[in-house]
């Protein structure tokens, strides 16, 4: 078993790499977006990006360690304002990592959709965990954005319970949340869903 500090250090380095990669793809420009990965389950500890940091130059020192109550255990700075959403996804989905992007297409598609976005018939859907055919229909709930994080976290939890098979959700005119059993799977889900959101937006099938 690796020591806890070693696990955290490795996750912090991976999250920093993901941030710079996603910035390069235009998915987390400026200080937008936030990322987390589970460092331990008992007790619950997350490695998570600090608030207000530029993802294009994201460094290991800008990754904090928090507990299950969203309190900082180690690191300098404040955790993302949306930390409660990460904790909700980790608990409800058993996720090992949660990634949140602010792409142009997620903003456009979520702003033009009502309750959610249905995506089906695309080969890229097979990149989502557990999906073996392009005939799959993926439903991404769209949730109205709010600055009241406890209330928003409750809404997210309710919608995730309503749609237990979904691989992500959209905050309206805000961005995409997705997750995976580990950071590699979560990163793949971002790539798949961002591709599909762009296709959906460009073809107008979200209206």
Image: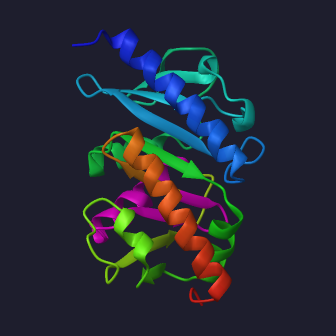
Q: Describe residue 140's horizontal placement relative to residue 173 as left or right.
A: left
Residue name at image x 78 percent, y 43 percent: 30
Task: Depth check: give the residue in front, 10 or 144.
Answer: 10
Residue name at image x 42 percent, y 48 percent: 186
Residue 194 screen position, x and y as percent: 56, 63
Q: Quadrant of residue 200?
A: bottom right
Residue name at image x 66 percent, y 33 percent: 51
Q: Describe residue 68's horizontal placement relative to residue 18 as left or right.
A: left
Q: Is residue 2 above or below residue 31?
A: above
Q: Describe residue 95's horizontal placement relative to residue 197 as left or right.
A: left
Residue name at image x 31 percent, y 70 percent: 163
What is the residue that sits farthest to the front in this orientation? 123
Residue range of the region highlighted in magenta in the rendering: 149-176
Q: Is residue 63 above or below residue 182?
A: above
Residue 184 screen position, x and y as percent: 40, 42
Q: Is residue 113 visible?
A: yes
Q: Is residue 70 above or below residue 118?
A: above
Residue 87 screen position, x and y as percent: 39, 41
Q: Is residue 171 magenta?
A: yes
Locate the C terminus and report the quarter of the image it occupies: bottom right
């Amino acid at each position: 078993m690796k020591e806890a500090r070693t696990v955290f250090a490795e996750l912090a380095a991976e999250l920093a790499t993901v941030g710079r990669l996603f910035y390069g793809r235009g998915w987390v420009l400026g200080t937008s977006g936030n990322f987390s990965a589970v460092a331990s389950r008992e007790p619950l500890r997350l490695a998570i990006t600090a608030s207000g940091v530029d993802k294009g130059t994201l460094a290991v020192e800008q990754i904090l360690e928090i507990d299950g109550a969203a309190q900082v255990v180690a690191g300098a700075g404040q955790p993302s304002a949306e930390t409660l959403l990460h904790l909700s996804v980790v608990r409800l989905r058993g996720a090992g990592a949660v990634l949140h992007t602010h792409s142009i297409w997620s903003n456009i598609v979520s702003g033009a959709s009502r309750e959610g976005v249905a995506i089906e018939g695309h080969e890229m859907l097979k990149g989502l965990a557990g999906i073996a055919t392009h005939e799959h229909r993926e439903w991404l709930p769209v949730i109205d954005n709010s600055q009241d994080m406890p209330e928003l976290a409750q809404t997210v939890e309710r919608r995730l319970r309503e749609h237990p098979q979904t691989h992500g959700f959209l905050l309206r005119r805000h961005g995409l949340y997705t997750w995976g059993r580990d950071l590699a799977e979560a990163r793949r889900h971002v790539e798949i869903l961002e591709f599909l959101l762009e296709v959906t937006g460009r073809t107008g099938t979200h209206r």
